[in-house]
Amino acid sequence: MHASEELSVQLERPQGGVALVRIHRPEFRNALNSVVRQQLADLFTELGRDSTVRAIVLTGGDSCFVAGADIREFASADPIEMYQRHTELLWDAIGSCPKPVIAAVNGFALGGGCELAMHCDVIVAGESACFGQPEVKLGLMPGAGGTQRLVRAVGKFQAMRIALTGCMVKAPEALAIGLISELVSDDQTIARAMELATQIAALPPLAVAQIKEVMLAGADLPLQGALALERKAFQLLFASKDQKEGAAAFLDKRKAQFSGE
């Protein structure tokens, strides 16, 4: 473990190539305050630059992912104060992380917690997981991607229902509408996320990085521009040693040994 118990965000390196980031504020159901946001941003920036890290698992633990933002920090704030916090810079450290990020979600992922999960690339949820954007019930609206990422994930009509009513979306429904990647039993959530991360970590990191970058960037481009971006990235990978090794291993009927070059 690379973080002390006093930190609200803890880092573990359980196995080669995989980092496990754990939010640990159980007394506040892992609510996101400014300290947690900053610790997450610092850690994801560090992991994004670490060549030994090939995949990241983000979790809140066995019983709660993130129950929301810490309301005490903004209940009486004014607009200029909220602007000057520039929390978008802290969120961007997660959303723009070049490494694949897998969320392991048990229990509540509400408000900022749902937005945090949607900053990830894959979401593995336990049967107890419950998603939602209840900001409207506080006279607010989602402010960290909860309208924009949600509509891109599940489409207009589900996103409108979720954001306008502030309803809870339980894990089976979340799977049905495309909000999560996989549904497992609660005791397997982190293990399954780690399994996926380990699979990804064993694959060629340049190819993995290009897949993530092109898929995210292309999603908001016109189709022809996105296809051109995909072609250029595809062509670029032919300069990598791992591409030559992967092709040779396939033809030789042996296991490839990827070097990350």
Image (cartoon, rainbow, N blue to C red):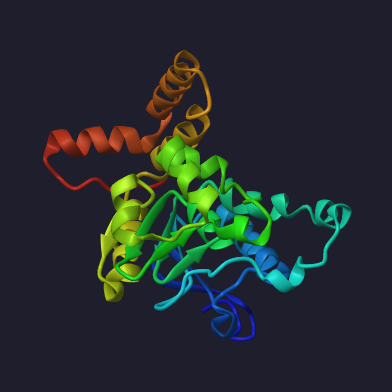
Relative horizontal placement of residue 138, taking residue 261 as reference (left or right): right
* Residue 90, quarter of the rendered image: bottom right
Residue 29, quarter of the rendered image: bottom right
Q: Is residue 7 above or below residue 142?
A: below
Residue drawn at x 23%, y 32% as measured from the top left: 247
In this view, 218 is above or below 9? above
Which residue lies at the image location 41% right of the left edge and 45% below the top edge? 205
| Observer-nearest of 166 and 28 | 166
Pick whichever, 248 or 13, lies toward us.
Answer: 13
Task: Give me the residue at 61% from left, 83% from top.
Answer: 4
Query: Given the current orientation, which residue lies at the most extreme left position?
Result: 253
Q: In the image, residue 163 lies at what x, y percent?
A: 53, 49
Q: Is residue 31 left or right of residue 18?
A: right
Pick the front one: 258 or 66: 66
**Horizontal and vertical percent for residue 72?**
73, 73
Instruction: Give the vertical position of 254 relative to 41 (above or below).
Output: above
Number of disc labels = 0
The x and y percentages for residue 69 are 63, 66
Q: Position of residue 85 (x, y in %)?
A: 81, 57
| Residue drawn at the location 34% of the way across and 71% of the way down | 128
Query: Residue placed farthest to the top in the image?
Result: 224
Visible in this render: residue 112?
yes
Tell me, yes or no, if residue 119 can be seen here: no
Q: Quadrant of the C terminus?
A: top left
